[in-house]
Image: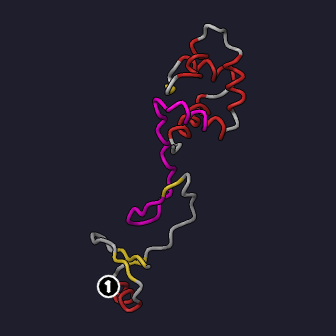
């Protein structure tokens, strides 16, 4: 499909060569093809004059995720064994040991999550990515 633009008018979309020729004689311009972009990380928009490629906004980090979704994300990120090792090395009275076994969900801002992050040498961005992935798990 060919997009034709004229100031103050909605774009016309057609593949009819006669309509395209008529409109271009009347001052309409054929919109150029969009440039290459990565739809995983970028979005594209026509601003009336040119194509604008911009970075997609970061997805929101869930405040809380179901425990089984977090475990799946840990497996996906090849981090589950390291987290389970961290949990096993905690003191018997550490609430995170019970949370790991029995909690129905985990909060991103929980002290145990922060403690594990520091112990495992992860950045906040890595833990955020883990929670985003866990939030996207489909049961």
Would you say residue 41 sits in the magenta stretch? no
Compared to 22, does 55 lie above or below?
A: above
Q: Write the residue at 51% across / 20% down.
A: 110
Identified at 46% across, 30% down, the residue is: 63
Question: In which image quadrant can residue 47 be found?
Answer: bottom left
Highlighted magenta segment, given as a residue range = 44-72
Q: Residue furthest front?
A: 102
Q: Where's residue 120, x and y in %?
A: 69, 24
Residue linked to disc 1: 26
Percent position of residue 129, x then y: 58, 37
Give whichever of 125, 52 is nearer the camera: 125
114 with respect to 75 (left or right) = left
Q: Secondary structure at mark 1?
A: loop
What residue do we see at 48% from left, 42% from top?
Answer: 59
Q: Is residue 98 above or below residue 78?
A: above
Mark 1: few/some/many CA within 10 Å (<14, 14-19, 20+): few
Residue at 54% across, 22% down: 102
- From the viewer's perspective, is 60 left or right of 82? left
Please state which of residues 129 and 73 is positioned toward the viewer in this rendering: 73
Q: Is residue 89 above or below residue 84?
A: above
Q: Residue pushed farthest bottom? A: 18
- Quadrant containing the N terminus is bottom left
Query: Is residue 50 located in the magenta-colored stretch of the structure?
Result: yes
User: Where is residue 78 shown, x and y percent of the image?
Assistant: 70, 37
Viewer-nearest residue: 86 or 123: 86
- Residue 96 place in picture, x, y as percent: 58, 16
């Amino acid at each position: 499909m060919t997009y034709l633009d004229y100031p103050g008018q909605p774009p016309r979309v057609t593949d009819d060569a006669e309509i395209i020729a008529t409109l271009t004689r009347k001052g309409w311009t054929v919109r150029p093809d969009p440039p290459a972009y990565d739809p995983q990380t970028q979005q594209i928009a026509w601003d009336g004059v040119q194509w604008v490629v911009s970075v997609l906004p970061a997805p929101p980090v869930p405040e809380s995720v179901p425990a089984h979704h977090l475990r799946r994300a840990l497996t996906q990120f090849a981090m589950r064994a390291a987290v389970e090792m961290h949990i096993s090395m905690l003191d018997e009275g550490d609430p995170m040991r019970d949370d790991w076994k029995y909690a129905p969900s985990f909060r991103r801002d929980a002290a145990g999550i922060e403690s594990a992050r520091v112990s495992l040498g992860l950045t906040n961005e890595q833990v955020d990515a883990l929670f985003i992935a866990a939030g996207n798990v489909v049961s």
